[in-house]
Structure formats: C-alpha cells, structure tokens
Image: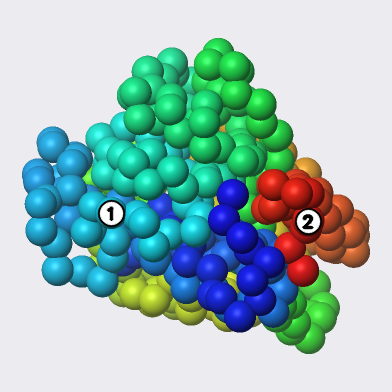
Amino acid sequence: MKDFQETKKAVNILIASTRQWNPGDEFIAMGVRNLIKAVLKSRKINWILYDRNPDLFLDGFNKPIHRPQIWTNAFNNGTATYIDLAVVAGTPEWFGLPMIKFYRAIRQSDIPLILLGVGYIDRRIAFSYDELYCFKKLLKLAIVRDEYASRALTEIGVRHELLPCPALFAAAYPITRKSRKREHKKIAFVIQTNRTINQSIPEELVYASICEVKRMRQHGFKVDVICHYIDEFADFSRSLAPVRYSYDSSDYLSIFADYDLVISTRLHGAILANALGKPAILLNIDSRSAGAAKLFPFIYITTPNDLLSQIDKVFNLPIHKLIEWKSKIKAQYITLLKLALKREKNEVID
C-alpha cells in the first residue's frame, strides 16, 4: 500500500465512473468521493477519471472498448505509475470490455484497488484474467450493493461487504427546505422513456407514469416532472410541464431538495431522494433496480396502479428515522474504508 501518511503529498485517485452519460453514475461517484474525503479528512486529493462513457468506445455498445486515442480530459495514457489508489464507483459496469484498460493498468503498476457499491443483475459473471488478478492480489475492500454482485464475488472466493449504494452520500451536506403543510407539499416525479439507448423502460410503464402524473395533479397534488436525460426532457418538457432538467448532474441535488417526496422510475432518482433526507417511491421492479433498492428501507416499491394509495402513507413517515439510518450506514462505510486504507504497519490515515 502506498504511504498515505505523507501529509504534504496529495493522493492521486483513479476513479472509474462516467461523465456526461448517465447522472446515476455521477451520483454514485459523488457519494464515493464524499466518503473517501471523509476518511482522508484534510488530505489533498487529485481525482483522475477513468471514463466509461460509450461515446469514447470504438463503436458504442457494439464494441465497448476505448478508442486508442481520446480527447476528453480522462485517463487514457495506459500507465498508472502515478496513481496511489484505484476506485470503482459502483454501477453494474465494474467489469468487462469497458473496464479492460482500467484493470490492465492497475495490474501492471500494482495499484491498490477498492470496489464501492458495485452491483449487477441476476446473471452469472465470467471475469477476465486481469480482473481476477486485481481482485485476488490488489483488492483492499469490496462493498457490493446487491445479492447478485455478492454472489459473483462469493463464487471466486473474494471477501466483501453488503451495504446500500454509496449514492446515498451524494450530498456532502444537508440541503434543508422549510417544512410544508400537507396541502402545500411538492412531489417530484422522475420519468423515463422507452426510446433511449441506455436505461429505457417498458412502453407500458412510460404511459402508466404519464397517466399517474396527470391523475395526481387532478387530485390536487403539486407535481413537477424531473428528467435525467435530454431525450426525456425533449419528450416531456411541453406535454408534462412543469419539468426540471440540467446537463450538469450536480444540479440535481438542489433540484431534488425542493420536493417533499420523490416518485421515480429510476433507481438513482429514488436514492438521491434518500441522500437528501426525502422518502421515495420506486416504480421500476427490474432485477437491477429492485436488487439495490432492497437495502433502502425508505424507498418503497410499488406499481403505478397502487401509487395514489401510497402517497399519504409515505408523506407521513418519520423523516428523522431516515436521517438516523443514513448516519448509521455512513459510519459503517467509514469504518471499513479506514481499515482498508491502513498502511502495512497498521497506521490509519489521519
């Protein structure tokens, strides 16, 4: 392990995530960065991005390997000798072709590795030689967010912990809003389409969600629609107005903070709500979403047909319990990270 005790030396951390692709990835990366900063405290950190944005691949999802030369401001030089720590910031894309250069580089340079919040779907995983080498020889900590990633690591004999997705810590500090009475409470409805290349939802769920937005408004609820993708915003900005959107994922912290309840077809729309101390209702029950949501007691999974009957119940939840639960989960993360970032002589980073 590199000497993290050198207080004058900045720590160079290579983090695998995406930029300008999927806000959910960036919410996870925000949470991971906040957790690591909480452990390293006053230490300076240089963050280097290993970007899995498909725009950088040879042929998108058809050939998801990075082009030999990319012009974005991300890791691409093949050598990781200047890296002190490599971190995979969650998502189901923590192995496979998009990660070839990541694992090859850290194996060749013998860089310590941490997996934080990785997940998958109900499917077997065949790991590559570089991935297996890194998991067996270089891995200092693995925290998974669902039973599927847990099963995959168990099958190859890798010790790990199971905790909620670190996007729960995307907000470094609480963003508070004045408490509203029932008749003034605001609802955010995060909606998707069935026409995007990535993370589309079934057409039936799209239309059911549209109907529920309109029905809730008819029942007197103040409902704004939130879109994560420009494709969705183009579809709904007029027909379902008012609609909120930003190309900058960090803006969603202040956007979501303005609501009392978040209803979402997106997993990380619901998780970001919890990160801000808001309860959430998740309408998507695919294995990826439901698997991760199982660890969130303040994300309620239901169907559009039952949504209206659930709203008042979720509005009345004791929010202080959500805050207490979040603090408890954060303490577990911090404890595990401190142990993982010890020096070989068992000196914890100050």
Q: SS of the residue at dot 2? A: loop
Q: Could you tell me which residue is drawn at 38 percent across and 39 percent down? A: 107
Quadrant location of residue 179? bottom right
Residue that badge 1 annotates: 79
In the image shown, does 329 or 37 lie closer to the viewer?
Answer: 37
Q: x, y percentage for residue 214?
A: 49, 61
Tell me the amino acid under the disc marked 1: Thr
In the image shown, does 317 or 24 lie closer to the viewer?
Answer: 24
Q: Work out whether residue 39 can be spotted.
A: yes
Tell whether label 2 touches label 1 (CB within 8 Å). Answer: no
Whether 288 is drawn above or below 46: the answer is above
Quadrant location of residue 161? top right
Whether 182 is drawn above or below 164: the answer is below
Tell me the amino acid under the disc marked 2: Glu
Q: CA distance from mark 1 to mark 2?
A: 28 Å
Specify the farthest residue to the bottom. 178
Q: SS of the residue at dot 1? A: loop
Q: Identify the disc placed on residue 347.
A: 2
